[in-house]
Image: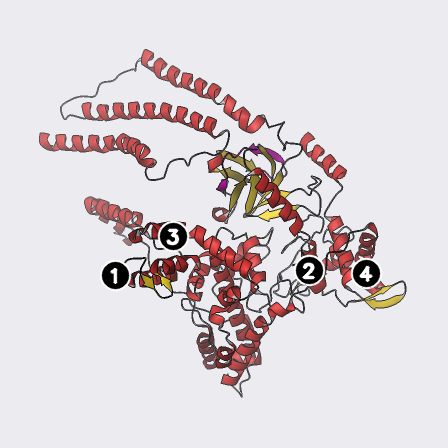
C-alpha cells in the first residue's frame, strides 16, 4: 500500500470517527476558533544595511542596532518613545505627542471634533452609563486600552453608587469623560495599524506589506522620513495635521482611501504611530549610514541621531507656509502671466513647468520620461523611493492633498518632497531681459493658470454633458 | 436490518429534513428581533420596493413550505422497505401542467407588479424639483476604493476649479428629490444605500443619472455592492441628510472654505 492511500483508507475504515472529526472541526471554526498568530517583529532595513559594507559584514553590530532601536522605540506590540531627560524639563513627552498637542491652545476645534466623534462611536456605552446600567457597557472593539481603563474605573466604583464623589467630580462624570475624551495609547494604535495599514505599509512602515506589490503607485515608505503631502516649506517633516488630513481624505486615485469611517481618536492615534515608525526608520538609516567598523555603534551616535530626528519633527509646525491676507483676484492678465511662466522652459528663464507637465498640462512633457541607465529603455521618471511616477495631469482636476487655491499655492511654493517637483519660491527666472527670483505673486499666477487648465466655461461643460447624454 | 433500527433511521432523516423548513421559517420570524432584517426605509420610494420584496417573499415562502412539506412527507411515507419492489411510473400530465402554469402565472404577476417601482426609481426622474437630470445636485465619483461627491460652483458649473469635493462624506438636503450623476474613475462599482433601497452600478465611461428623496434627516451608510478589487470590503461612505436650510448653509460654508488660506 502506498502512503498516499493512507488517509482514504482511514476514512473508509473509520467512517464514524472521520464524520465526528469533520463535525468537530466545522463546529470549532464556526465558534470563531482561530489559530494563534505569531507576534510581529520589526526587521532591519536590509537595503540600507547592505549599502554600508562595514555594517553588512558585522552581524554583531547589526544586532546591536536592533537592540538600540528596540531600546528607543519598543516593539510592534509595545511601541514607545524613550523620553530624554531634557524633554521632561521642557514638558515634552513624545509618548503623548498627539494628545498633548491637541489639548494645547489653538487646537480647540480639533479637540472638540475628537470629543464629538468619540460620543458617536461610544454612544451605546454612554447611554448605558447615563441609564446607570453599568453591566450593559460593552467592551469597545479595537480599543483594548479603553476597555482596561473602564475595568479599572468600574473596580473603583464607590459604594454609594455612580453619583458619589470621585476625584474632582462624581464617578459618573469620570466615566463619561473616560469615553468622551478617549485618546488611544501607542500600543492600541499599533494594533489598529496592524489591522488597517500593515498589509500595504508593512510592519516597519517600509511600504512593503504583502498588498504593496499589486499597487501603482506604491504605498509610502515612511522610513526615510519623507512625506509628499505637507503644507510646509524647506522639505520639513510633516505636521500632525498633515498626516491626519492624508488619513481623513485619502490620497485620491491611489489605493489609499479616506479613513473617515474610523473615529477621529483612532485616526489621531494612527498618526502618532506612523510618526513613531517614520522616526524609527530615519534613526535606523542615519545610524546605518554613519556606522564605521573602527568606532562601532556608540551610545552617543544613537542619542544624537534620535534627538536630531525627533527635533526635526518637533519643529514642523513652525514651517507652515503662511499667506497673509486674502487670495488675490483671479484676472485674465494674471492667468496669462502664469501661462507664460508655465510654458517657458528653464533655459529661457521660465518656471520650467512645461518640461514635465507638458504644453497641454497632461503630464507628458519631455522630462516626465527618461532612459533607464540599465535597460536603455524609455520609462517614466523615478522618485526618491525608486518608484516610477506619473507626472500630474493638471487637466483632470484631481489634486492630491487638496484642490483649494491655498493648497495649490503651497504645492508650487515648496515643491513636493521626494519628487522632481522643485521649490518655486526664490527660483531664478528671467523676464523682459531682467533676472529676478520668483515671489508670492508669481506663484499665485501659476496657481490661477493651473486652475484654468482644470476648468471649462459653463457653455463648454454643458456641450460636453450634452454629448455624453446623446451617446 | 431490524425493523426498529429502520424506523429509527427513517424518523431521524425525516426530522432532519423537517428542520430545514422549520429553521428557515423560524429565522425569518426571529430575524427582526436579532436586527438582521431590513433597516427601516427613509426614502420616498422605499415603500414600493419593500412591498415588492414582500410580495415575492410571500410567494416563495408559500412555495418553500409547501414543497418542503411534501418532501418531508414523501421521505417518511415512501421510505425503502426491505421486501417491497420499486414501481415505475410515467408521471401525471395534469399535475405537471399545474406546477408549470402556476409558477408561470406568478412570474407574470411579479413582472407586472414591479413595473411601477422600476419606472419610479430608474426611469421617471423628477422634473419639477430644484435638481433635475440636466441640473443635478452633484456628481458622485466612485474609484478604487473611495466615494467622492462633487458639488458644482455657485453658477452650477461642474467643470469649474471651484467645485466642492468631499471624500467619503456625501451631504444632501432632506425632503427634496435629489438627482445626481454617478461616474466611475476606474472599474465597475455599485452605489448601494440600504436605507434608501437604492442600488445603482457605476460604470466607467458612463454618466448615469440617479435620484432619491430622503425623508428623514440623519446619517446613512453607503457601501460598494460590486466586487471592485482587493479593497472592495473597505469601500464605504456616509450620506448625511440635512434639512434644506442647513444643507444650503453647509454648501455655502464649503464654497467659502475654498477661499480660506488656513
| Residue ID for mark 3 | A126
Figure check: A11 above or below A419: above
Graded by Cα atoms within 10 Å as few (under 14), some (14 to 19) or many (20 or more), the crowding at tag 4 reads: some
4 or 2: mark nearer the eye: 2
> Residue A405 occupies which quadrant of the picture?
bottom right
Q: Looking at the image, is mark 1 or mark 4 earlier in the sequence?
A: 1
Is label 2 on the same chain as label 3?
yes
| Residue ID for mark 2 | A411
Q: Which residues are magenta?
A: B203-219
1 or 3: mark nearer the eye: 1
| Residue ID for mark 4 | A345
Figure check: B109 above or below A10: above
Residue at image x 36%, y 58%? A175
Residue at image x 78%, y 60%? A441
Q: How is the image coloured?
A: secondary structure
| Element on which disc 4 rests | loop
1 or 4: mark nearer the eye: 1
Amino acid at each position: 500500500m502506498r502512503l498516499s492511500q493512507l488517509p482514504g483508507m482511514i476514512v473508509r475504515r473509520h467512517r464514524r470517527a472521520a464524520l465526528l472529526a469533520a463535525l468537530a472541526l466545522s463546529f470549532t471554526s464556526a465558534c470563531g476558533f482561530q489559530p494563534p498568530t505569531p507576534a510581529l517583529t520589526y526587521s532591519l532595513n536590509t537595503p540600507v544595511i547592505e549599502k554600508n559594507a562595514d555594517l553588512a559584514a558585522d552581524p554583531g553590530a547589526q544586532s546591536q542596532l536592533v537592540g538600540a532601536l528596540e531600546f528607543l522605540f519598543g516593539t510592534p506590540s509595545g511601541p514607545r518613545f524613550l523620553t530624554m531627560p531634557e524633554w521632561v524639563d521642557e514638558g515634552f513627552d513624545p509618548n503623548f505627542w498627539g494628545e498633548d498637542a491637541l489639548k494645547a491652545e489653538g487646537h480647540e476645534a480639533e479637540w472638540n471634533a475628537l470629543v464629538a466623534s468619540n460620543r458617536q462611536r461610544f454612544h451605546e456605552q454612554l447611554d448605558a452609563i447615563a441609564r446607570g446600567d453599568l453591566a450593559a457597557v460593552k467592551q469597545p472593539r479595537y480599543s483594548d486600552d479603553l476597555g482596561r481603563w473602564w475595568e479599572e474605573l468600574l473596580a473603583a466604583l464607590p459604594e454609594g453608587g455612580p453619583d458619589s464623589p470621585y476625584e474632582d467630580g462624581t464617578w459618573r462624570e469620570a466615566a463619561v469623560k473616560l469615553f468622551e475624551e478617549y485618546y488611544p495609547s501607542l500600543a492600541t494604535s499599533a494594533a489598529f495599524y496592524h489591522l488597517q495599514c500593515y498589509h500595504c505599509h508593512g510592519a516597519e512602515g517600509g511600504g512593503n506589506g504583502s498588498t504593496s506589490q499589486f499597487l501603482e503607485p506604491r504605498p509610502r515608505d515612511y522610513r526615510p522620513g519623507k512625506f509628499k503631502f505637507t503644507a510646509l516649506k524647506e522639505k520639513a517633516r510633516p505636521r500632525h495635521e498633515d498626516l491626519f488630513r492624508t488619513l481623513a481624505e485619502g490620497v485620491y486615485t491611489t489605493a489609499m482611501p479616506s479613513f473617515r469611517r474610523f473615529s477621529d481618536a483612532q485616526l489621531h492615534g494612527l498618526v502618532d504611530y506612523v510618526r513613531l515608525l517614520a522616526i524609527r526608520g530615519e534613526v535606523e538609516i542615519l545610524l546605518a549610514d554613519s556606522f564605521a567598523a573602527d568606532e562601532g555603534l556608540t551610545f552617543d551616535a544613537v542619542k544624537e541621531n534620535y534627538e536630531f530626528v525627533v527635533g526635526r519633527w518637533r519643529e514642523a509646525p513652525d514651517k507652515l507656509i503662511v499667506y497673509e491676507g486674502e487670495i488675490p483676484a483671479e484676472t485674465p492678465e494674471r492667468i496669462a502671466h502664469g501661462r507664460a511662466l508655465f510654458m517657458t522652459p528653464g533655459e529661457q528663464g521660465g518656471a520650467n513647468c512645461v518640461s514635465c507637465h507638458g504644453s497641454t498640462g497632461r503630464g507628458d512633457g519631455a522630462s516626465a520620461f527618461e532612459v533607464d541607465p540599465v535597460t536603455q529603455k524609455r520609462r517614466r521618471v523615478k522618485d526618491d523611493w525608486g518608484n516610477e511616477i506619473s507626472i500630474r495631469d493638471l487637466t483632470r482636476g484631481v489634486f492630491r492633498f487638496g484642490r483649494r487655491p491655498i493648497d495649490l499655492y503651497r504645492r508650487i511654493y515648496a515643491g513636493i518632497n521626494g519628487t522632481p517637483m522643485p521649490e518655486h519660491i526664490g527660483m531664478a527666472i528671467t523676464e523682459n531681459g531682467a533676472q529676478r527670483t520668483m515671489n508670492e505673486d508669481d506663484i499665485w499666477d501659476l496657481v490661477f493658470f493651473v486652475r484654468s487648465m482644470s476648468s471649462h466655461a459653463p457653455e463648454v461643460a454643458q456641450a460636453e454633458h450634452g454629448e455624453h447624454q446623446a451617446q | 436490518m431490524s425493523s426498529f433500527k429502520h424506523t429509527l433511521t427513517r424518523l431521524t432523516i425525516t426530522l432532519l429534513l423537517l428542520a430545514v423548513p422549520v429553521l428557515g421559517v423560524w429565522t425569518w420570524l426571529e430575524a427582526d428581533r436579532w436586527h438582521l432584517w431590513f433597516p427601516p426605509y427613509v426614502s420616498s420610494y422605499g415603500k414600493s420596493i419593500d412591498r415588492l420584496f414582500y410580495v415575492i417573499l410571500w410567494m416563495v415562502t408559500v412555495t418553500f413550505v409547501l414543497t418542503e412539506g411534501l418532501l418531508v412527507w414523501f421521505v417518511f411515507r415512501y421510505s425503502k422497505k426491505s421486501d417491497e419492489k420499486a414501481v415505475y411510473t410515467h408521471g401525471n400530465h395534469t399535475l405537471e401542467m399545474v406546477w408549470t402554469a402556476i409558477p408561470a402565472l406568478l412570474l407574470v404577476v411579479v413582472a407586472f407588479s414591479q413595473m411601477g417601482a422600476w419606472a419610479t426609481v430608474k426611469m421617471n426622474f423628477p422634473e419639477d424639483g430644484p435638481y433635475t437630470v440636466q441640473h443635478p445636485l452633484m456628481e458622485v465619483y466612485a474609484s478604487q476604493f473611495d466615494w467622492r461627491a462633487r458639488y458644482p460652483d455657485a453658477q452650477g458649473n461642474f467643470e469649474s476649479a471651484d467645485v466642492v469635493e468631499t471624500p467619503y462624506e456625501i451631504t444632501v438636503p432632506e425632503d427634496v428629490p435629489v438627482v445626481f450623476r454617478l461616474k466611475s474613475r476606474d472599474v465597475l462599482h455599485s452605489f448601494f444605500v440600504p436605507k434608501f433601497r437604492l442600488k445603482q452600478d457605476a460604470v466607467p465611461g458612463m454618466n448615469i443619472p440617479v435620484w432619491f428623496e430622503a425623508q428623514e434627516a440623519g446619517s446613512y451608510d453607503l457601501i460598494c455592492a460590486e466586487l471592485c478589487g482587493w479593497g472592495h470590503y473597505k469601500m464605504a461612505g456616509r450620506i448625511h441628510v440635512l434639512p434644506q436650510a442647513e444643507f444650503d448653509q453647509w454648501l455655502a460654508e464649503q464654497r467659502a472654505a475654498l477661499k480660506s488660506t488656513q
